[in-house]
């Protein structure tokens, strides 16, 4: 039976024929599509193929906003999924049918693919059974949970910690300068962690490598859409979120055991341009007594960006450089990208060509894409022979003294193409155990994982007695087995500082515990306060690295003045004191799958008030409470603590720009010395135990110790000490409860610090391994100690030398991003405007859909306007004045020279909350009389740069003045439309993946021509006025508006 519901009315014009397509049913549409393709006189077979693919994709997306598929007859299958228990009690594999189970590809996310495919015997049955609907090779899985459930995970994502209301797409994307609404970042983790109202938790993993839509827009409902067929795996419900993550780790593997030095501070920049500059930076760290363990070499160390080479002038002797760094206690990490320069005579290219290792096009020839070196070929890591080839290159590379490797650009990122990656039609000749020979759409999301795996294996080949350290930008569920990660190319803004906490936590909640952001922000110039505040919280993240972009000011800790330098020194000394704790947490993460950094609600999963807190997190039993607001330091924060006992502590280093620290009652944590680098540590160094008793007067904690590198710990050569403390009759006894491992206990002094609250403590010294005791004073004495300590703490905060709260740093290059943009939030729109550079709009978010159509750097792109036909002519970079500012409205004016001003009126019209209106004009303010009152020749050019969230699924559509219908795709390049071909007052940017259209309406009497320009991941939809002089009586104007419409 044919459905009568009309979904969308779309008109197509091909040649001289126009077709009106009514999307009634897949069958009716396919019949119409067949006629269209058979009869339409297309100009070329390429155009025909593109339109055919577009229409086929469009049919596959035929679902309304609620996810109800438009189906008919046998085109759809639906029902409850079948299940079988796997792995352990409480874990279930779900498939749409037995045939679907048999048709599923091997698992790449599972550490052992057979575990997913092998049922176990158990009496348990699932508490929640997903439903499915299969339509046109798309599998829609829905899992409905109790009202009040909170949703987390989804891997590397920006925006809010709690994900209800969000939708993301797993498609690894080079996402420079991403915003809170960006839906695809560098990694893909098709995983959701749900915390139920009663505090229990459940996880669901979609075990597919293909592009996947994770839709959490309906409360307490998880919907996952991806190509058929693939299983979904549920974990739990278990008693706590930690138990779910432990269970997940049994499937996808635990994090590799990091070498201890990698938990220190890392200093990076794009780029330190010579070995002398590297040594200068290293020397300055030691001179200023700022702890640091690692210096990083970005891409400019290479000879012409050729991987596995060194610039012969600037890095003549890398082994000697590394030797000097090692002497000062530094390690060296070097970048390797997947793009290999296509150049005969370059040994890597010649070797790869000889061994037939490159990703191929559909015609069987090597694919060539442009990245840093120019035209490049790309290793096909889906083949074991290619991974071995790469691993041997890495092995040889290590002989230069390389301590760690940084895999970048491995989404893979490609320049000068709208999709920002290689074509989905490319061919990978993969191993059967991975999925066999498939096109790139199948392996895209795991390309970075497989590169990281190859690099990891190469490092192990080089030296089996050392643990590899690999950092990867792109990844997938399971990447943690081989590499750490960071949150990509972030911005030097307070917004990104705030988001960095949630992003690190989400990765941890998705199975990747070793991550951190670029401290201070990668793009733009941090201010002293922003950098100091970011270092304060960043020093508590599992991975701690500062990194900054080329052409920005220096971002080393001493680059922002003495006040900021001191805060960074205090923050990093804190980290180094806590490395015994952090290293112990990673031992358990590696051996048991427990998380390292977690949201504060892990302290009490039943408490709904904790589930959306984003400025605090747990590092084991330590609660870190940070301020991420510019005007709110620690001294002004309102702190919400979980139920129970939480005792504050510090290291006599309290500062308004450092986080507050609390230790959970019932916990003991190990604390070391504030060393300059991890290599300074000695087993005989003094050890401190911080003790916080619970309501029963008890506490316990663990310390893991080994060589800090290598794999002797797997043979029992380590020491795991369980300490306990107990209060009896006013005496607190601290002792070793039990030990594991064959290591002898080092002969060292043990310092016990018993926390009392308000940073007050009692302490005693003894020898580690002995029973130590402290006598607890009378209650009134304890209260007096706490009161005195709280006063001293308050005095330290008040007397601390504050970091200057300035918005600009004089004499620096680059651009300050940390000024506060004007936020225009009204109706359905949330815009951010920066008057101080071009009056540009840098963010345009549609609130109901959560879509950020426009997100740019401060000094370029975004929404700009020019006063001439030339790109970036006057108007785009001048400082604008705010003429009027009201709720939902801002009026700006910029002086563009010659007596002219460019005025921009941005507002949400009253009673029309779905529209954002922009009225712009070039006005003659003081044109000289000698010119007859007329200005120079000007043109008002509106130049918005919209972000393509899904480039391969996007196009521009409009009807021209002459009635012809146009669809402009990314591979159509740049096109002008004027005269009769000018859009008839409206054009649309359509994202089929989102099911949304950004509609731009304008006054056709004011617009002379329109321009569509596709770039790497962006598109410009430009409006041009006529070119003419203006007077005070004849300004140039363009009035236009934006609206978002839902489409199927």
Image: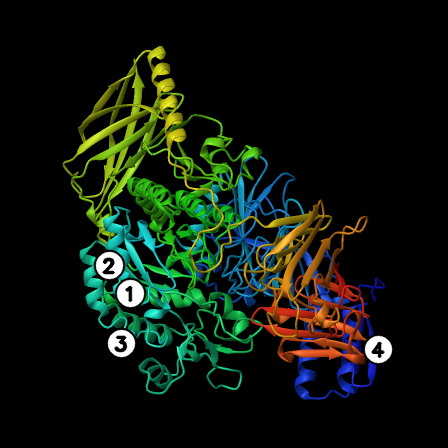
Q: Residues within 10 Å of mark 1 (few under 14, many from 20)?
A: many
Using the numbered discs, state the Cα–Cα distance from disc 1 to disc 3 in whole angstroms: 24 Å
Earlier along the polypeptide chain: callout 4 or callout 2?
Answer: 2
* Vertical order, 399 against 705 (above or below): below
Mark 4 secondary-structure assignment = loop
3 vs 4, front mark: 3
Q: Write down the quadrant of residue 301 in the picture.
A: bottom left
Given contact means CB atoms under 8 Å apart, are the residues at marks 1 and 3 in contact? Answer: no
Label 3, label 2: how many angstroms apart (C-alpha)?
Answer: 29 Å
User: Based on the displayed image, in which of its 4 quarters is residue 141 positioned?
Assistant: bottom right
Residue corresponding to mark 4: 963
- Residue 708 rendering spot, x and y as whole percentages: 24, 50
> CB under 8 Å between callouts 2 and 1?
yes
Label number found at residue 466: 2
Q: Who comes first in sequence, dot 1 or dot 3?
A: 3
Badge number at residue 459: 1
- In this rendering, the label closer to the viewer, 4 or 1: 4
């Amino acid at each position: 039976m044919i459905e009568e519901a009309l979904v969308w009315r779309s008109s197509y014009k091909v040649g001289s024929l126009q077709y009106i397509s009514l999307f009634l049913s897949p069958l009716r549409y396919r019949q119409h599509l067949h006629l269209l393709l058979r009869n339409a006189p297309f100009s070329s077979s390429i155009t025909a193929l593109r339109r055919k693919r577009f229409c086929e994709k469009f049919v596959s997306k035929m679902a309304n906003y609620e996810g109800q598929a438009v189906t008919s007859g046998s085109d759809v299958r639906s029902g409850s999924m079948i299940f079988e228990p796997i792995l352990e009690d409480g874990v279930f594999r779900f498939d749409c049918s037995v045939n679907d189970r048999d048709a599923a590809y091997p698992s790449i996310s599972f550490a052992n693919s057979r575990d997913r495919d092998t049922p176990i015997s158990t009496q348990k049955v699932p508490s929640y059974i997903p439903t499915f609907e299969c339509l046109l090779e798309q599998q829609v899985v829905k899992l409905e949970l109790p009202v009040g459930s909170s949703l987390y995970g989804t891997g590397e994502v920006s925006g809010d910690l709690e994900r209800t209301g969000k939708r993301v797409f797993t498609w690894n994307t080079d996402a420079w300068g991403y915003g809170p609404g960006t839906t695809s970042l560098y990694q893909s983790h098709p995983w959701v962690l749900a915390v139920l109202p009663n505090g229990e938790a459940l996880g669901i993993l979609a075990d597919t490598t293909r592009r996947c839509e994770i839709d959490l827009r309906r409360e307490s409902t998880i919907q996952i859409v991806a190509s058929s067929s693939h299983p979904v795996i549920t974990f739990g419900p278990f008693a706590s979120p930690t138990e779910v993550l432990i269970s997940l780790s049994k499937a996808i593997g635990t994090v590799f055991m990091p070498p201890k030095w990698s938990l220190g501070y890392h200093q990076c920049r794009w780029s330190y341009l010579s070995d002398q500059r590297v040594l200068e930076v290293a020397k300055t760290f030691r001179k200023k007594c700022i702890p640091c363990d690692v210096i990083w070499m970005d891409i400019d160390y290479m000879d012409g960006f050729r991987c596995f080479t060194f610039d012969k002038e600037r890095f003549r002797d890398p082994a000697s450089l590394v030797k000097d760094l090692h002497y000062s206690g530094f390690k060296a990490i070097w970048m390797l990208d997947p793009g290999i320069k296509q150049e005969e005579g370059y040994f890597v290219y010649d070797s790869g060509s000889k061994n037939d290792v490159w990703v191929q096009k559909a015609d069987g020839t090597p694919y060539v894409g442009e990245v840093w070196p120019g035209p490049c070929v790309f290793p096909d890591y889906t083949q074991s022979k290619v991974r071995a080839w790469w691993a041997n290159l890495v092995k040889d590379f290590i002989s230069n003294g390389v301590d760690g490797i940084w895999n970048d650009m491995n989404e893979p990122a490609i320049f000068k193409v709208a999709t920002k990656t290689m074509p989905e039609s490319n061919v990978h000749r993969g191993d059967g155990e991975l999925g066999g020979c498939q096109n790139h759409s199948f392996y895209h999301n795991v390309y970075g994982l497989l590169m990281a795996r190859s690099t990891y294996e190469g490092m192990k080949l080089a030296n089996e007695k050392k643990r590899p350290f690999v950092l990867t930008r792109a990844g997938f569920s399971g990447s943690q087995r081989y590499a750490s990660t960071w949150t990509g190319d972030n911005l030097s803004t307070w917004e990104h500082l705030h988001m960095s906490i949630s992003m690190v936590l989400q990765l941890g909640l998705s199975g990747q515990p070793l991550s951190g952001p670029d401290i201070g922000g990668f793009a733009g110039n941090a201010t002293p306060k922003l950098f100091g505040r970011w270092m304060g919280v960043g020093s508590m993240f599992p991975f701690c690295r500062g990194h900054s972009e080329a052409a920005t000011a220096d971002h080393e800790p001493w680059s922002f003045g003495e006040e900021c330098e001191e805060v960074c020194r205090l923050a990093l000394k804190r980290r180094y004191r806590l490395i015994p704790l952090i290293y112990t947490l990673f031992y358990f993460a590696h051996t048991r799958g427990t998380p390292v950094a977690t949201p504060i609600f892990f302290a009490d999963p039943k408490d709904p008030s904790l589930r959306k807190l984003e400025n605090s997190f747990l590092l084991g039993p330590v609660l870190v409470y940070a301020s991420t607001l510019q005007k709110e330091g620690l001294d002004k924060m309102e702190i919400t603590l979980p139920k129970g006992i939480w005792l504050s502590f510090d290291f006599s280093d309290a500062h308004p720009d450092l986080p507050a620290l609390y230790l959970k009652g019932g916990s003991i944590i190990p604390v070391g010395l504030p060393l300059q680098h991890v290599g300074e540590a000695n087993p005989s160094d003094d050890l401190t135990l911080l003790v916080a008793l619970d309501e029963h007067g008890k506490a316990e904690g663990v310390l893991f110790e080994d060589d800090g590198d290598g794999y002797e710990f797997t043979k029992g050569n380590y020491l795991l000490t369980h300490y306990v403390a107990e209060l009896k009759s006013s005496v607190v006894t601290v002792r070793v409860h039990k030990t594991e491992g064959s290591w002898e206990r080092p002969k060292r002094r043990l310092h016990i610090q018993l926390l009392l609250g308000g940073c007050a403590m009692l302490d005693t010294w003894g020898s580690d391994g002995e029973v130590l005791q402290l006598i607890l004073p009378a209650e009134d004495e304890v209260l007096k100690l706490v009161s005195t300590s709280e006063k001293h703490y308050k005095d330290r905060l008040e007397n601390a030398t504050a970091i200057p709260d300035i918005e600009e740093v004089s004499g620096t290059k680059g651009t300050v991003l940390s000024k506060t943009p004007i936020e225009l939030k009204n109706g359905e729109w949330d815009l951010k405007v920066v008057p101080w550079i071009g009056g540009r709009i840098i963010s345009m978010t549609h609130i109901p859909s959560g879509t950020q159509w426009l997100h740019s750097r401060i000094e370029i792109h975004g929404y700009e306007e020019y006063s001439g036909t030339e790109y970036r002519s006057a108007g785009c970079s001048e400082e604008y004045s705010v003429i009027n500012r009201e709720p939902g409205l801002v009026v700006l004016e910029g002086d563009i020279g010659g007596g002219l001003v460019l005025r921009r009126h941005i507002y949400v019209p009253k009673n029309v909350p779905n529209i954002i209106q922009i009225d712009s004009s070039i006005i003659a303010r003081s044109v000289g009389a000698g010119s007859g009152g007329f200005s120079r020749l000007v043109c008002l050019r509106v130049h918005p740069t919209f972000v393509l969230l899904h480039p391969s699924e996007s196009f521009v559509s409009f009807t021209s003045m002459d009635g012809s219908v146009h669809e402009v795709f990314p591979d159509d390049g740049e096109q002008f439309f004027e005269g009769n071909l000018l859009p008839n007052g409206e054009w649309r940017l359509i994202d089929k993946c989102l099911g949304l259209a950004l509609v731009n309406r304008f006054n056709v009497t004011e617009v002379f021509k329109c321009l569509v320009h596709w770039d790497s991941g962006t598109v410009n939809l430009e409006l041009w006025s006529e070119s003419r002089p203006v007077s005070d009586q004849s300004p140039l104007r363009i009035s236009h508006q934006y609206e978002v419409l839902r489409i199927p």
